[in-house]
Image (tube, grey):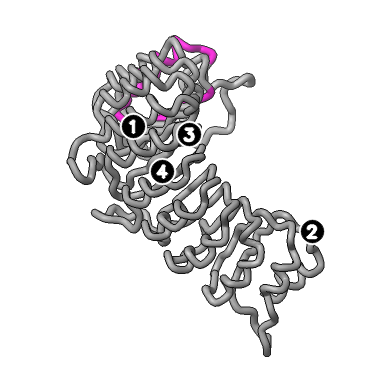
Amino acid sequence: MVQLRRLMLRAPQLTHLGTGSFSASENVDQEPDYSFAFAACRSLVCLSGFREIWSDYLPAIYPVCANLTSLNFSYADVNAEQLKSVICHCHKLQILWVLDSIRDEGLQAVAATCKDLRELRVFPVDAREETEGPVSEVGFEAISQGCRKLESILFFCQTMTNAAVVAMSKNCPDLVVFRLCIIGVYRPDAVTQEPMDEGFGAIVMNCKKLTRLAVSGLLTDRAFEYIGRYGKLVRTLSVAFAGDTDTGLKYVLEGCPNLQKLEIRDSPFGDGALRSGLHHYYNMRFLWMSSCKLTRQACQEVAQALPHMVLEVINNDGDAVDDVEILYMYRSLDGPRDDTPENVTILQ
């Protein structure tokens, strides 16, 4: 902290500052006034870092909060009260990254103050599969109601409802990026126990500018039908612990003409889903499928049908002969690489 203060006093024109450790300095008899150093940096608009943050030092940043447009607390395990003490000064904030330790109460404070917020990312402190996590549909819906200029959201949670996602789609129609990561395997609507189809369907229907989408939770083919029908601008799609049958992925590959990046993890899609995209793969940058239901034979057939694509099969289990742990298919102007490790096979 002493070094940070010295830096700031020497460079008062700083606009972006990553603070690193934000805790007590060693061998200091009397702590200097850190607030004075921050007050001297009147041009500061972006703060990040905050590793090992001590709550006693948080008031030091109050003098610059009024001008901040970007605040990154994604390494700082701050609680709701600590965040509220800072966020109440941040009326110009447009970008906020936080950990879910701020809980729904912290998100509600953000919604009440940050009316110009454009981007929000909420990361998990602990990604364990619990029934209830520190953030939920309560904080999520509060953000949608208070931050109606939102364009990008990444939200990790354990529970979610269709109603909250529908509210987000209606309150924040300018969303370009929507990534909802429900931690756990095939989690349904936390209230109705229904699939999350209608929520994600509302996102692609109501958010006309959407180009990046990440889906998770209990989803049937209906959700992917919505994506294929309405997600005409979607360029990047990520699927994790979601999906029903091969038909679902077929809807996407046949209905999303601008799709360039497709990443699928731990989902039940198999050979039929893979074959359904033969007409579109040359238009894509890459396809990644891991822990799905692919066979080497189907991957080989795709490789033969698309000689200008590179298909890498990655199997960490040496005994797996036909099953495919990971398929990575991509375009390459230079052809296949020649530095593959033993567990990677390039199909010709």
Labels 4 and 1 touching (C-beta < 8 A): no
Amino acid type assigned to the residue bearing label 4 in the image: Ser
Between discs 3 and 1, the one toward the N terminus: 3
Residue visible at 50% across and 55% down in the picture? 113
Secondary structure, mark 4, is helix
**Residue 61, horizontal then vertical, whole percent:** 62, 67
Which-is-in-front pick, marks 4 and 2?
4
Amino acid type assigned to the residue bearing label 2 in the image: Gln
The alpha-carbon separation of the residues under discs 4 and 1 comes to 15 Å
What residue does disc 1 label?
200
What residue does disc 4 label?
144
* Mark 2 surroundings within 10 Å by alpha-carbon count, few (fewer than 14), some (14 through 19), many (20 or more): few
Which-is-in-front pick, marks 3 and 1?
3
Amino acid type assigned to the residue bearing label 1 in the image: Phe
Secondary structure, mark 3, is loop
Between discs 4 and 1, the one toward the N terminus: 4
* Mark 1 surroundings within 10 Å by alpha-carbon count, few (fewer than 14), some (14 through 19), many (20 or more): many
What residue does disc 3 label?
175
Number of the label disc, if any, that sits on residue 13? 2
Between discs 3 and 2, the one toward the N terminus: 2
Bounds of the magenta segment: 285-308
The alpha-carbon separation of the residues under discs 1 and 2 comes to 44 Å
